[in-house]
Amino acid sequence: MTRPALYGFNLDAMTPQKIFFNSSLPRSGSTLLQNILAQNPRFYCTPTSGLYDLLYASREHFTKLPFFRAQDPELMRTAFLSYCRAALHGYFEGCTDRPVCVDKSRGWLGTVDWLNEFHPQPRLIVCVRDLRAILSSMEKRWRKYPHLHPPEDDPTGLKTGTIQMRVAAWLNSIPVGNTLIRLMGAVERGQHRHFHIVPFEDLVANPGPILEGVYQYLGEEPFAHDFENVEQLTREDDSHYSVYGDHQIRRKVAPVPLDYHETLGKELANTVKRDNAEFFQTFYPGR
């Protein structure tokens, strides 16, 4: 029996899509990488995605609602994981007919074990960046908008105060700290060995070999990318985010000057490196 078309898609004609994940530190090149990959006509690459949040909310309801808890737990577990798997694939079937999809969300980093239950052996691309450079970028964004009231999700809660206070808040809350905790938790569990780590500094300095490594990790044929003219194909209205939201990319892939000593000051920059020694030892050994 042929199933009816749904929103213009012939469900029987669809082939299973490969689904991968970009779960990266903020301001570490994840948007740039998504738009580079999107040059490949086989790839559909999301902007910052809400798919993870939809599934996470479903998990919360599944855990709390008495209707599920009152039934056979193994049956409900099987049913729920089947639901998650179908939701994951159904989401992208509704988005695109391209065979390869890359979902960008920081949330996947903290739920790899759960993801593995309904999407076995998930492949995560994780963009990282020198924390000092991330914080320098955050500070420059903060200084750029002195006329704006602090957003509700500004962990400092202040437009005054010291740079040391802001850096401490960013490292211990959103948007940096939460993702950093997830990443280092994955390191603690050894999960990061199954990720494909993309250092921002290498991506912008030598994108060709970096993309070759990404394709090898994903099991896809390499593609001839144009790093001189990367069109912005993922669209996000940054007005819906706080002052830290900046998802615009430069058209040309090129190195970014290291200015964290000037922005943060050498003493604070050294403190950040010392206090996050495990991060630097794991992702930037010898640098």
Image (cartoon, rainbow, N blue to C red):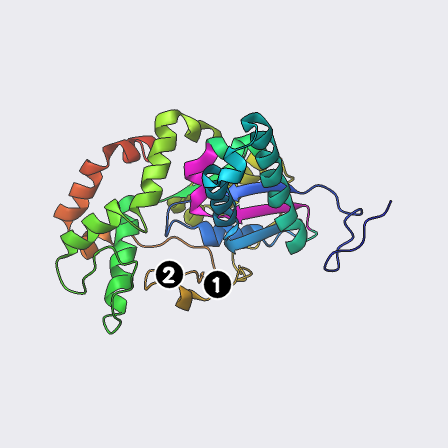
For disc 2, the neighbor class at 10 Å (few under 14, some 14 to 19, many from 20) is some
Please tell me which residue is depicted at 43% across the width and 60% down the height of the picture: 247
107 falls in the magenta region: yes
Quadrant occupied by the N terminus: top right
Please tell me which residue is depicted at 66% across the width and 54% down the height of the picture: 94
Distance, label 2 to label 1, CA atoms, is 10 Å
Is 252 on the left-hand or right-hand side of 277?
Answer: right
What is the quadrant of residue 185 in the picture? top left
Q: The residue tagged with tag 2: helix, strand or loop?
A: loop
Q: Position of residue 240 (x, y in %)?
A: 41, 65
Do the residues bearing badges 2 and 1 touch, measured as CB atoms within 8 Å?
Answer: yes
* Residue that carries the numbered disc 1 in the rendered image: 236
Most foreground residue, 155 or 58: 58
Residue type (three-letter) at the residue carrying disc 2: Gly
Residue type (three-letter) at the residue carrying disc 1: Glu
Residue range corresponding to the magenta coloring: 98-112
Point out the tag, 2 or 1, that comes first from the N-terminus: 1
Seen in the picture, residue 251 relative to 88 is either above or below; the reply is below
**Which label was assigned to residue 245?**
2
Most foreground residue, 236 or 201: 236
Is 189 on the left-hand or right-hand side of 81?
Answer: left
Q: Position of residue 198 (x, y in %)?
A: 44, 41
